[in-house]
Image (cartoon, helix red, strand yellow):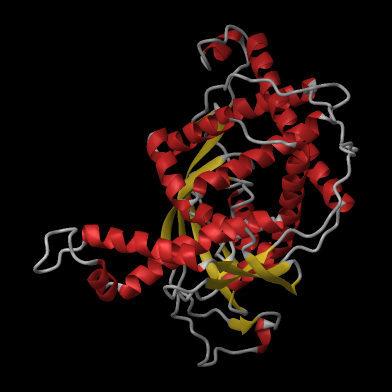
Amino acid sequence: MTVVVSTREVGVCRREFDIEVPAGEVDAEHLRVARIYRRRARLDGFRRGKAPLRLIRQLFAEEIREDVSERLAPRYWQLARREEDVHAMLPPTVGPVEVVAGQPLRFTVTVDVEPEVDIGDDRSFELPESDTAPAEAEVDQVLEQLRLERSTWVPVDRSAMRGDRVRGKIHRAAEEGFDGLPAGEDHHDHGHGEDHDHDHDDRGSATHDMDFELGDEDVWPELTDNLTGLSAGRKAAFESVESEDDIERRRRYEVELDEVLERKLPEVDDAWARGLAESIESVDDLREILRRQLQAGKAEAAERHRKEALLEQLRGRYPVDLPEAVVEHEAFKMARSYLNARARQADHAEEDLPWEQMMERVRPHAGRLAHALFLLDRIAREDGIEATREDLERALETMARSRDTNRGKLRRELERNGGLEALKIDLRRDRTLQALLEANPPADGSGGAEAEPVAEGED
């Protein structure tokens, strides 16, 4: 049975399909829906489910027509899609559907379809090779970082030096007597005009405790310079020029040093190593664990670089013009994912961009990603690659744990909102990418190694 009446191109990879449902099928569906309404309806004078269909159709005419269209349009679009061998890249847009009993039902579907591209048989790529074996110097560096994390701070009776920890108070003097000048202008050439808002400062109390490491890149350089060489009980003063809204403000600060502390690093011996984890017996054991951790990290980075190189070569091998709506859809998901991740952060220094600027920023990345995903889908179809049942169950189990729910409940939720099919597509793409990587193995055949974590240090 042919259901597509006509088809036409309406844009880059965008097509419209005029679809017709036979009158007999419209009437049959209309009757089925009307009977459903009769079973549910409670009408005065009739037992439930016994009201005449004529009356049901009259009372619920609009609702029945909507239900009939919602049942028939998706069903016949799927028939049309198979009839025309359409590979849609996004869910279709269905035009107005007007149901009239006794007449065929016609409606229009607009859909973004895959661009034409000839995927050849070549599955070879020039992927970067990398040595994942860590050098001893790298192990030494991680071991030294571990010593820093496990270090302690002890008070010392001497002047502060870079690398010391200092504690005390910092006081911001009143702004009276300091200039507020447009950035870049010489403050000696201006007086204290009435336009200068000296009293405005929204930073709270003028006196704060300070506790930081001298030389820390997050600390004002003026603080490090003025506290270096200072001993406990001494004071220092300095000026700082700060720019706010293109206005330079010169402020005066005073610091009072209460305590100087020196970092004490632990000795690297077997006793110290045993205190890090129960499984560690010696420094040699510790170095081996660190070596395995480094190797696992380097193998993961190497795999990531190989994936990026493969996808970049894949895009270069098969250039296509994707529908604009597909790129926009991917950009929307990318921007939303970024903002959701930012919202979960307890604190972040950067302000989020307005939505339109965010979309503009991610759109080029979204275009490259959409291109790569399209090609992976085509290769999966050409090579007959599908996600296995085991793949799906593992993914559902992982998702269920992360959402603190059970796998069955999650599956039902995903089935209702279409997420299960999307998950299967993602898993198929993962399998396809993995198959391409396995077809182009590293020359040394290196892979990642699991490593036991070392205990976290405390400040």
**One can see residue 236 in this view:** no
- Quarter of the view holding residue 433: top right
Residue beneath the point at 45% across and 60% down: 71
Residue found at the very far left of the displayed protein: 45
Q: Is 441 located above or below residue 82 in the figure?
A: above
Q: Is residue 426 visible?
A: yes
Left-right relation of 205 to 181: left
Residue most extreme to the bottom: 194
| Rendered residue at 63%/89% (across/down) | 190
In the rendered image, the quadrant that contains the N terminus is bottom right
User: How far across and how far down the image is residue 357, in percent?
Assistant: 63, 71
Side (left or right) of 216 relative to 103: right
Counting labels gives: 0
Q: Residue at x 80, y 37 (%)?
A: 306
Q: Is residue 87 above or below residue 310?
A: below
At a point 81% along the width and 58% down the height, the residue shown is 116
Residue 43, given in percent of the width and then of the height, sits at 14, 67
Q: Furthest-top residue in view?
A: 281
Residue 366 on image: x %, y %: 69, 59
Residue 329 x %, y %: 62, 62
Instruction: Give the camera-side residue of 447 and 23.
Output: 23
**Splitting the image into 4 quarters, where does residue 226 fall?**
bottom right
Nearest to the observer: residue 6 or residue 392: 6
As drawn, 22 above or below 261:
below
Considering depth in this image, is 122 or 214 the residue closer to the camera? 122
Q: Is residue 429 shown left or right of residue 436?
A: left
